Image (cartoon, rainbow, N blue to C red):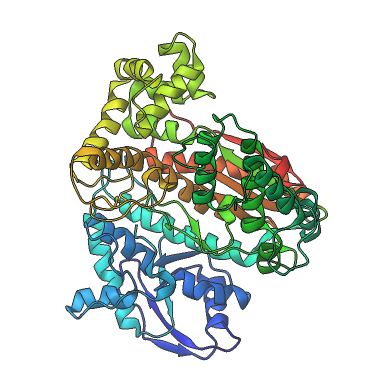
Amino acid sequence: MPSGAGGLLRPLADDGAVLGPERRVDDLASAVAAIEARDRPRWLWPSTAELYPRLLAAGVRVERCHDLELAEAILLGAEGRWGQPRSLAAALARLTGDPVPPDPPSRAALPPGGAQESLFDETFIAAPPPPLDAVLRVFADQRTRTAAAPSLAPGGGAVRTLVAAESAAALVAAEMGFTGLPWRADIHDALLRELLGPPSPVDGGPPARLVELNARLNEAFGARVHPDSPAEVLRAFARQGITLRSTRRWELQHVEHPAVPILLEYKELYRLWVAHGWSWLDQWVTGGRFRAEYIPGGVVSGRWATRGGGALQIPRVVRKAVVADPGWTFVVADAGQLEPRILAAVSADHRLARAGAAGDLYAALAAEAFDGDRTKAKVALLGAMYGQTGGMAAPALAALRRFYPTAWDLVEEAARTGEAGGLVRTWLGRTCPPSSVSWREGFDEPGMEVDARGGARGRARGRFTRNFVIQGTAAEWALVVLARLRTHLTGLAAELVFFQHDEFVVHCPEGEAEAVVAAVHTAGDEARRLLFADTPVRFPFDVAVVTCYAEAK
């Protein structure tokens, strides 16, 4: 937000009642800063992603907000209207019966996606045009719809908690993008030169190591092959009498041919060069920071995504360049065995919950139901959540079904609902896309159109919905941890600089590390109680205090 940029303000009660007249200010950032310091309100605005980065650039941070666009996406999904435009203009058009405009191109491709405590209370509007009356009308409509939205959690208020947590996460996302992850460009460059050799003197050409591996591959095949072309590689193997369905690692590693180790090394280094090579370094690292654009709710399960930069897929070798500032350190917290623990808490299966109270859930399961075989216990639980029913998983699943029937029934019911074309919901109420919408099976595979019930596609959708209720609830737990951790860091110099699924990274002065570690554990326990009340299941963190991100487990 440029210095002096104006805007509109109006005070509201928490229920949306207007407490004062609309007021135009010449310098919105200064006005927001003054009100924030005086009242610490909850700000109501159309889009955190659009407004908050400009406030941050003006030196203004806020504590709480309600993001109308993120809330609209959640509510549309809950109402079976997943994927409809979610902007303020679209929400208002639905209320008035006018034609619904598409979302702006920057956000059009994004999906919507016991007693509950409230994360936030009082409200204040801060918005550039459109008129504040539109904001008020959409907010009132969302309050009504939120109260009626269903979820897996007993009682009411779950979707309200989800909207609050998603809005808080949007503040974190903008702040992390603004602050940036400490990044040593000199170390990154040295790593690339060590692994890839010097960059090509030809602009955009492959580095020396890739050129060398390509030559060796051509020699192994006895013909010229472009190793970055799967079709050419498959044809080259076919000429050697080897038929492959793909060039994926798991398939290549079973093939005995001198080209295989060369190709595997090439693929790994090529991926590094393309995704995190010198071009990436020049584009994304400035001023000693990697500043990604994080997208809360950017995946159908509610997990985050990023727009460019590959922040959520940083290779371990490249993490060596993530080095704390002098006198500072990283606190890296990883929630262990998160999804199995979520299953134990959501299902309220007493025996599984008792195992979830242990430090090592798989070991506890093994001792109780799998003759001490931890591997078999892990295979069974992951198989139940991901639909892996064949091979060595079958006998383990039979034991799981016998000892933990309530947990088994929950994921089986979700799978049956998905196979029949139905919708499933997370604990707080995020709803999966309908069967007519492209979705990502396992959330890591290419999108797949599912437009028929039953058969192979129905079973594939069943695997998707089976895990959706668990992975989506895990994402909700993580959102609440983010919100609470951000609150507990208030007053410290520490700053959240990275978040990925179930891993949280805080950059802090060395003298604050102990306080940050305590804040992480407190936030995790608060998230457990907020979502699951008195469940015996625990969600422990593996916490490392390190000066380099790569040193964390």
Res 346 quadrant in image? top left
Q: State the image coordinates of residue 529 (x, y, percent, origin top left).
A: 43, 39
Q: Nearer the viewer, residue 368 or 154?
A: 368
- Which residue is depicted at the point 39% across and 77% down? 11
Q: Position of residue 349 (x, y in %)?
A: 33, 25
Please determine whether, in this image, residue 394 is positioned above or below residue 515.
above
Residue 498 percent coordinates (x, y) = 61, 53
Please determine whether, in this image, residue 427 is positioned above or below residue 11: above
Counting the numbered discs, the total is 0
Quadrant where the C terminus is found in the figure: top right
User: Which quarter of the picture shows residue 419?
Assistant: top left
Is residue 534 visible to us here? no
Side of 213 relative to 236 (left or right): right
Q: Is residue 148 visible?
A: yes
Q: Is residue 447 left or right of residue 172?
A: left
| Image quarter (top left, top right, bottom left or bottom right) of the N terminus | bottom right
User: Which residue is drawn at the image coordinates 49% and 24% (left, top)?
Assistant: 361
Residue toward you, 247 or 465: 247
Is 152 placed above or below 380 here? Answer: below
Q: Nearer the viewer, residue 137 or 375?
A: 375
**Nearer to the camera, 421 or 127:** 421
Q: Is residue 62 above or below residue 29?
A: above
Q: Residue furthest top?
A: 371
- Could you tell me which residue is drawn at 22 percent across and 57 percent down? 79
- Position of residue 494 measured from the top left corner of the image (x, y, whole percent): 68, 55
